[in-house]
Each structure stands twice: as C-alpha cells, then as structure tokens.
C-alpha cells in the first residue's frame, strides 16, 4: 500500500509539473536532499534554490545550504526568508556551535535593524520566523539565547501547528538546550514534539533527522530504528543523511549497517569533491566511524586500510592543525588521524611496526598529541619497556594538563573532553601499577577511572573514552580469576557500548563457568 501511495504521489507530481507552474514553496526530491514544502513570498526564480537550501539545512549540510540561500538572495534581493535561511546555517545546535558574527552579517544584508528586517517579511508566518532568528542571534550569552530561541520557536509552532518545518525547528531548538551533553528528559521532550508530526510527514528530512538525534543512545535507539531505515533513502545525495543512520546502528551494535552507512556517506562526499576537482576524503567524521565499525566487526585489515588512507591524506596535504584544537577527533585532519590510529591499536589488539612507529606533524594540536602519547604508552607497556612507558606517561600527563587548561577557559558545560585526559592518565597509571605488581593500587586507580567515566553523558557514536573504563576493569578482574566481579564490569561496559567487540568477548569469558 505504501509503495502504491508513493508511486501515485510521484505520478501526480509529474502531471502537475507538466500541466502547471510549480506552486510557490513546493519542491520535489529531485536533488536528493529530502522533500520539503514551504509556502513563502519569494519570487518564482528563487524557489528552487531556497527549497534546496531548506532541505540541506535540515540535513546539516550547512555550507551547501548557505550557498543555496545566497543564490536565492541574488535572484530575489528582497526575499526575507532567504536571508533567514543563510543566517540559520551558522547555528549548529547538536554540536553546540554557533558563528554569531557570520549570522549577524547575513541578516545585515537584508536590513540594518531587526525591526527593519522583520518589516520586509511579507506574511505573519515569515515575520514569526524572522523574529525567532533575531532572538537566536540577539543579546545575551549563547546559553541564554538558546533557551530564548526555544521559547520563540515554541510560539511559532503553536501559532502555525500545521507547519511541519516549524515543528522540526522547534524540536531541534529543544535539543539545542542540552548544553551539558545528552540529557534524556530534554531529548525525549524534543522527540514527543516531532513524533506526532512525523505520522503525517514520513519523508520530511528535518523530522527524520532530528528524531534520530533524539534517540541515538543505547536505551532509546530502538525507537529511532524506523527513522534510520528511512533517512538514507529520502536524502541520497546528502552525505550527513547517509552517515546519520549509523548513529542508531552504533547505539544498537549493528556493525555491518554502521560500515555500510559510512561507506555510503563517504561516497556522496567524494562525488561532490570530485566535481570540485578535489581528492577523495581520507580523514574526518565518516572515516572515523567507518574505522570503528570495521574494528567492531573484527576486520582489522579493513580498519588498517582506513587508517592508512587517512595517513596518506595527512602526508599529501599541507595540513595545519587548529590552534587550541578540542578533544573532538573530527576537529581536524591531524586529530582524526591520531584517534583512528589509537582506536586501531586498542581494539585490533595488533601492533604493526609501521603504524606503531608513525609520528605526528609538528603542528599537531593537543588532542592529537594526547592520543599519540597514550598509544605510545600502551605500546611500551605491552612490550615490557618500563622506562620507556614511564617517560610516555610523563608526556601524557603534560599534554593532558595543557588540555585541561584549555578546556577550563571554554564556556562548555559538557565535561567529556575536559575529563578525558584525567581518565586516560588514571588508566595508564593503573596499567603501570599492574606491571609493577601493585595490584591493589592498580585496582584502586581503575575504580577511580570508572567513577569518573560514569559522571559523563553517554556519547553518541564511538565512545569518548577510547578504552572504556568498565571494559578495562573487567579485563583486569578476569585476569585475576575474579569472574563474578568481571562479569558485572563487562555488563556495565556492554550497557554503555552495546555490541562493542572486546566488551562482548569479555562478558562471554567471564560468564563461562569453567575454571
């Protein structure tokens, strides 16, 4: 029935296009970004670019969306919603990023003051959208403006309850108030707003996308599986849409699907890069997740190929790491390379000489350097090189303190990257104590690391702590023959990282009743 309905819809749209002019604000999915309809007062010439920009905005393809909105501005300089759209591309709620200066510059192109800009909107609905974006980029801290914007979008949603985009943007605004990381009540409130609208708008890219974000944790991921199955199909030309499905698949430990989704995402990105005369992507968000998926499938040779490709990208490009780079491995090519390599060395249990001996560029940021020092420590301790391991630990502690100092200066209530260096240090010190035979101290340090990780919000995607602490504790206990305690640790590890290969194997080994 659904297939028949979709076929009828396509045929009807074709007939309309042949016999009539496209209604202002209607769009098909011809560009592969998702189907959107948005009644507006822009002229006919600007419609295609405006609607493309809107679909791309919902897909988090922010650069492409901004370019599309700017084309709409050029075709209709008085089109207020085109400037609204461009301004919206500079706010990334899920990532807690905002380019306030660029957003205000986009709005200034329309008119010099908020009142003058709102006056250029030609309908009450457009005025409501403009008013909300003025709040988003108005006075106050980002923290304050995020909550004010959420209230503004709640009002837009209440005034125009049939406006699916208002519903989607309201749900996204709610998600954008979870400043301290994943907050379950906030995320479920966002989902409740969007679920009702989704019943009648199954192919809307914003609703599908934001519902996946709402559900991408191990407990709620089954609720997001429907959206994950749909999103890649309705936005085939949006790389982020292809990747986004893997948020649910990672949370459910569905590793073949994680690999497939990120291969598809990389293929979309590479088509775009090829058209612009650029080389294929080797590092970054999608390759990082692909590498992790291969490792969980127990395919180290595939994972190593992914790391090798990232290293080749690093070698071939004049890469400059960002000063004060964050702990996010997606923040730069160098950081992505360092983290992909570390994950390989931890999860593959394989230390090939070439990879172990790789070095970082001199301009590497502190996040990449932490990952390299931790990998260096692990390599030395596993080879029984105590003196070298101690030296690596000292360097690990030094770069970790630099990260803490940088993170303390940021207005970021999410503690994950601020705490990560301390957890890494505790893990390394525990391994050194175990090497020295001080098992009481080793266990004490591991329990400290576990307690710290339990204060962090659940990460969407690969774990922020590259060697999850419950897993490391479980391995330590299992080696001592304390199977019951190890089993409890591995159960907690699997709950935080479902399907993670080493945690699942540890749980199976600790559940074995044989001596």
Image (spheres, rainbow, N blue to C red):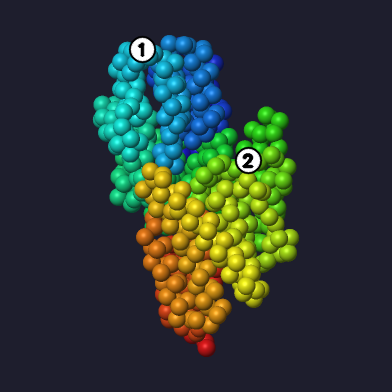
In this view, the residue in front, 385 or 129, is 385
Find numbered disc 2 in the image and state the secondary structure of the residue it sits on. loop
**Residue 76 image position (x, y, % from top left):** 48, 11
User: Which quadrant would residue 266 be assigned to in this image?
Assistant: top right
In this view, the residue in front, 370 or 193, is 370
Numbered mark located on residue 457 in the image: none
Q: Residue at x 69, y 39 (%)?
A: 318
In this view, the residue in front, 385 or 306, is 385
Q: Which residue is mark 2?
A: 320
Tell me, yes or no, if residue 318 can be seen here. Answer: yes
Q: Look at the picture and state if 455 lies above or below 390.
A: above
Q: Residue at x 38, y 30 (%)?
A: 165
Q: Residue at x 38, y 43 (%)?
A: 411
**Residue 361 image position (x, y, % from top left):** 66, 48
Q: Which residue is mark 1?
A: 120
How far apart are labels 1 and 2 at the CA level? 43 Å
Q: Residue at x 59, y 65 (%)?
A: 392
Q: Look at the picture and state if 277 lies above or below 353.
A: above
**Residue 402 image position (x, y, % from top left):** 50, 53
How many neighbours does mark 2 have within 10 angstroms: few (below 14), some (14-19), or many (20 or more)?
some
Position of residue 255 in the picture relative to residue 120 (left or right) = right
In this view, the residue in front, 381 or 66, is 381
Position of residue 342 in the picture relative to residue 448 (left or right) = right
**Residue 317 image position (x, y, % from top left):** 70, 40
Q: Look at the picture and state if 419 lies above or below 12.
A: below
Position of residue 378 in the picture relative to residue 229 (left or right) = right
Q: Are marks 1 and 2 in contact (CB under 8 Å)?
A: no
Q: Look at the picture and state if 513 lies above or below 374.
A: below
Of marks 1 and 2, which one's residue comes earlier in the chain? 1
């Amino acid at each position: 029935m659904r297939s028949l309905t979709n076929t009828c819809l396509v045929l009807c749209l074709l007939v309309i296009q042949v016999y009539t002019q496209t209604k202002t604000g209607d769009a098909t999915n011809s560009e592969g970004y998702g189907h959107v309809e948005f009644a507006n007062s822009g002229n006919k010439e600007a419609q295609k670019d405006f609607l493309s920009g809107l679909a791309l905005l919902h897909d988090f393809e922010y650069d492409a969306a901004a370019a599309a909105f700017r084309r709409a501005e050029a075709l209709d300089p008085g089109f207020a919603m085109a400037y609204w759209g461009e301004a919206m591309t500079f706010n990334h709620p899920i990532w807690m990023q905002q380019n306030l200066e660029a957003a205000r510059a986009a709005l200034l192109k329309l008119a010099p003051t908020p009142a003058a800009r709102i006056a250029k909107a030609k309908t009450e609905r457009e005025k409501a959208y403009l008013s909300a974006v003025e709040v988003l980029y108005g006075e106050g801290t980002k923290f304050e403006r995020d909550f004010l914007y959420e209230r503004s979008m709640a009002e837009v949603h209440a005034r125009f309850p049939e406006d699916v985009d208002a519903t989607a943007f309201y749900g996204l605004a709610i998600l954008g108030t979870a400043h301290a990381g994943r907050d379950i009540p906030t995320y479920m409130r966002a989902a409740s707003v969007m679920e009702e609208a989704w019943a009648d708008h199954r192919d809307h890219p914003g609703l599908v996308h934001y519902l996946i974000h709402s559900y991408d944790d191990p407990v709620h991921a089954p609720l997001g599986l429907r959206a994950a199955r749909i999103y890649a199909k309705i936005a085939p030309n949006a790389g982020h849409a292809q990747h986004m499905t893997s948020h649910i698949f990672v949370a459910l430990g569905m590793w073949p699907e994680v690999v497939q989704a990120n291969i598809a995402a990389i293929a979309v990105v590479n088509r775009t890069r090829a058209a612009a005369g650029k080389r294929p992507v080797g590092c970054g968000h999608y390759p990082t997740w692909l590498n992790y998926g291969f490792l969980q499938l127990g395919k180290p040779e595939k994972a190593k190929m992914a790391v090798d490709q990232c290293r080749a990208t690093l070698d071939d490009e004049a890469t400059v790491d960002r000063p004060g780079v964050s702990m996010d491995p997606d923040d730069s090519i160098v950081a992505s390379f360092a983290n992909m390599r570390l994950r390989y060395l931890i999860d593959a249990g394989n230390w090939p000489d070439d990879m172990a001996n790789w070095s970082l560029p001199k301009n590497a940021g502190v996040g990449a350097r932490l990952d390299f020092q931790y990998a260096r420590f692990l390599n030395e301790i596993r080879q029984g090189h105590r003196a070298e391991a101690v030296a690596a630990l000292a360097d690990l502690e030094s770069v970790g303190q630099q990260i803490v100092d940088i993170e303390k200066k940021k207005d970021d209530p999410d503690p994950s990257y601020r705490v990560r260096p301390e957890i890494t240090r505790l893990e390394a010190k525990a391994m050194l104590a175990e090497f020295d035979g001080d098992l009481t101290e080793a266990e004490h340090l591991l329990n400290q690391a576990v307690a710290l990780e339990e204060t962090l919000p659940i990460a969407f995607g690969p774990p922020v702590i590259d060697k999850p602490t419950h897993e490391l504790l479980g391995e330590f206990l299992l080696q001592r023959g304390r199977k019951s305690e190890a089993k409890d640790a591995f159960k907690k590890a699997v709950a935080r990282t479902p399907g993670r290969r080493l945690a699942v194997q540890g749980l199976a080994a600790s559940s074995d009743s044989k001596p």
